[in-house]
Image: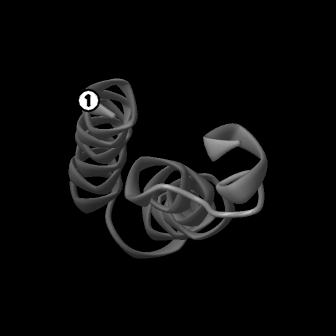
Amino acid sequence: MGLIKNAGRKTLGEIIIAITFFLGFPISALVFAYINPIMGILCLVFCIYLLYLANTLKKGK
């Protein structure tokens, strides 16, 4: 019964993964291409760290 009750709910890890893929990676690509390559690489590293954090949060449940 618990699986059916929580089927539509998203965990914090899944929400962070979705936001990172749809906002973080495109923004870091734009920063890399138009503003500063070093800042773009830093944004990309931050996105990868967010994915790692979200994955650990997702596994923790």
Residue sitting at 36 percent across and 48 percent down?
A: 47
Q: Is residue 26 above or below residue 55?
A: below
Residue sitting at 59 percent across and 70 percent down?
A: 23
Instruction: Tell which of 31 and 1 is nearer to you.
Output: 1
Residue 40 in the image: state x and y as whole percent.
Answer: 35, 56
Quadrant position of the N terminus in the picture: top right
Residue sitting at 52 percent across and 72 percent down?
A: 34
Instruction: Tell which of 53 and 32 is nearer to you.
Output: 53
Q: How is the image coloured?
A: one colour
Number of numbered labels in the structure image: 1
* Mark 1 residue type: Gly
Q: How many other residues sit within 10 Å of disc 1, few (<14), some (14-19) or many (≥20)?
A: few
Q: In this view, does 35 lie above or below 13?
A: below
Quadrant position of the C terminus in the picture: top left
Residue 44 in the image: state x and y as whole percent.
Answer: 36, 45
Residue 38 in the image: state x and y as whole percent.
Answer: 22, 51
**Secondary structure at numbered mark 1:** helix
Residue sitting at 38 percent across and 38 percent down?
A: 51
Residue 3 in the image: state x and y as whole percent.
Answer: 69, 39
Q: Is residue 14 left or right of residue 6?
A: left
Q: In this view, does 15 lie to the left or right of 5?
A: left
The residue carrying mark 1 is 60
**Residue ranking furthest to the front:** 1
The quadrant holding residue 9 is bottom right
